[in-house]
Image (spheres, rainbow, N blue to C red):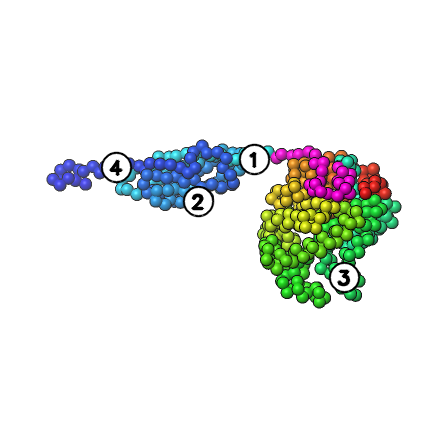
């Protein structure tokens, strides 16, 4: 280019390079959470980063650049693959970022350092349970049972078996006696047939919970009583009002994939779902009151295996039971509602409250979200089904840690029974084991000879070795 007189060339002035004004986050930031981060570089003018230049941007320590986006004055760089407890340096070399003006210098290079959070140190607790039940108005018998469990903790495990067909009978208790000459100390029963009680005329195959002779008989013989509740709910108000009363077995279930019953709606006063659960709790409370009046304390285990199932299988609808499908907060609210209702409205002070967990590996990460709280729980149980009889140290420590060692822990259900002496050797201070119903030998390791070994072990309490807790 020449001047107007045609003699001297005109020298075009070079524009200044874009200048970095700020970065978000600032260089040197610490405690970044997660596995990815977006770093935004803001300049004093509109900028661009050509595709050929993007490849020169780098990050160290195994992380990767997944995206570079320039828009107006900002360049956003997405970084993925971060690990806990590491420091990273993002490098944008000289000349990589450009302005839009003619004859302009490219921006100077920049480095941004940042650190991720340290991996939290796992805090493990020793079992040191509180000395009293969470219900200060507990009956004398309930206090006696809890005191006995405290005394045996770390010394012996109570033997337990669930009733035949999860019903209200002692067939499995007596079956173990025929095999070993001793009765299990703990008998498990279930309100699974609540919808058919009182029993319609002619329905002899289902349970009449007005007849509490089986648990009373077991208690009077020196045993302990455990109740749970596979809580059947209706799909609709019509199913509730018209279904089972007319002999229709459809429309009721406790599995999430079998019913659309909403726990969220059930927790709202004024809904038919709320009316349903309150009437069901009234019925169960009536049957538990029969036991209270007979002086029988009950180890009460409602809403079992909700924790873990909600997220463990990928989406909320895969929770096994409807009380887990609505998420942790709803499940805790229902548990607390039940406890408050049973104690404050119906005076059921004969209950020892158990919160049950799902033992599938990986579920422990969710347990604390689901725990109703120390003031609502006396014992933490975990249901374990494994094809072995070894100690269950992973599950044990996770149970202990959940309440920071303040609650007794137990194997609230199992298939094959973990060998009690091996559990104690490993430091697993389980209070009892409860073999699930169907058949005493339905799990391959629970052979007749193994049952005899269990019931004859110095590490196991049978009904015959129980003191009177009346």
Q: Residue at x 77, y 52 (%)?
A: 290
**Nearer to the camera, 449 or 434:** 434
Q: Earlier in the sequence, mark 2 or mark 1?
A: 2
**Nearer to the camera, 453 or 369:** 369
Of badges 2 and 3, nearer the viewer stands 3
Q: Residue at x 44, y 44 (%)?
A: 67
Q: Which residues are magenta?
A: 122-150
SS at mark 4? Answer: loop
Mark 3 neighbour density, 10 Å: few (under 14) some (14–19) many (20 or more): some
Q: CA distance from mark 2 to mark 3?
A: 67 Å
Residue on which the image places disc 1? 119
Q: Earlier in the sequence, mark 3 or mark 1?
A: 1
Residue on which the image places disc 2? 67
Q: Are marks 2 and 4 in contact (CB under 8 Å)?
A: no
Residue 256: image quadrant is: bottom right
The N terminus lies in quadrant: top left
Residue on which the image places disc 4? 14
Residue on which the image places disc 3? 199
Q: Earlier in the sequence, mark 2 or mark 3?
A: 2
Mark 1 neighbour density, 10 Å: few (under 14) some (14–19) many (20 or more): few
- Decide if residue 398 is on the left or right side of residue 180: left
Q: Residue at x 35, y 39 (%)?
A: 43
The C terminus lies in quadrant: top right
Q: Is residue 93 visible?
A: no
Percent x, y for residue 191? Answer: 73, 54
């Amino acid at each position: 280019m020449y001047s107007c007189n045609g003699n001297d060339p005109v020298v075009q002035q070079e524009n200044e390079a874009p200048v970095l004004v700020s970065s978000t986050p600032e260089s040197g930031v610490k405690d970044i959470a997660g596995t990815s981060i977006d770093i935004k570089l803001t300049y004093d003018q509109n900028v661009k980063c050509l595709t050929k230049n993007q490849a020169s941007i780098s990050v160290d320590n195994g992380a990767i650049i997944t995206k570079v986006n320039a828009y107006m004055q900002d360049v956003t760089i997405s970084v993925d693959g971060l690990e806990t407890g590491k420091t990273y340096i993002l490098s944008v070399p000289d000349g990589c970022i450009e302005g839009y003006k003619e004859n302009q210098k490219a921006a100077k290079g920049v480095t941004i350092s940042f650190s991720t959070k340290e991996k939290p140190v796992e805090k493990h607790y020793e079992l040191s349970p509180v000395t009293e039940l969470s219900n200060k108005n507990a009956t004398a018998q309930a206090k006696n049972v809890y005191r006995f469990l405290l005394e045996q903790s770390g010394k012996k495990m109570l033997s337990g078996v669930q009733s035949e067909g999860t019903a209200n009978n002692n067939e499995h208790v007596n079956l173990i006696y025929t095999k070993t000459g001793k009765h299990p100390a703990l008998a498990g029963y279930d309100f699974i047939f609540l919808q058919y009680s009182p029993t319609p005329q002619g329905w002899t195959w289902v349970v009449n919970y007005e007849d509490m002779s089986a648990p009373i008989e077991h208690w009077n013989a020196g045993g302990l009583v455990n109740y749970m509740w596979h809580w059947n709910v209706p799909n609709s108000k019509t199913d509730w009002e018209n279904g089972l009363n007319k002999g229709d077995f459809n429309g009721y279930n406790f599995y999430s994939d079998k019913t659309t019953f909403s726990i969220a709606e059930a927790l709202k006063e004024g809904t038919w779902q709320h009316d349903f659960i309150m009437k069901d709790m009234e019925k169960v409370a009536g049957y538990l009151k029969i036991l209270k009046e007979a002086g029988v304390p009950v180890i009460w285990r409602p809403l079992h295996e909700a924790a873990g199932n909600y997220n463990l299988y990928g989406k909320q609808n895969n929770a096994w039971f409807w009380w887990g499908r609505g998420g942790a907060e709803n499940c805790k609210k229902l548990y607390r509602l039940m406890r408050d209702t049973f104690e404050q409205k119906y005076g059921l002070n004969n209950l020892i409250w158990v919160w049950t967990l799902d033992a599938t590996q990986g579920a422990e990460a969710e347990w604390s979200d689901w725990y109703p709280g120390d003031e609502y729980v006396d014992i933490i149980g975990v249901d374990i089904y494994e094809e072995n009889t070894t100690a269950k140290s992973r599950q044990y420590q996770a149970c202990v840690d959940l309440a920071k060692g303040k609650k007794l822990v137990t194997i609230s259900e199992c298939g094959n029974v973990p060998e009690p002496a091996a559990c104690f050797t490993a430091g697993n201070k389980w209070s009892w084991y409860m073999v699930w119903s169907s058949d005493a030998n339905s799990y391959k390791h629970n052979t007749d000879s193994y049952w005899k070994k269990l019931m004859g072990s110095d590490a196991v309490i049978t009904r015959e070795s129980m003191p009177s807790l009346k």
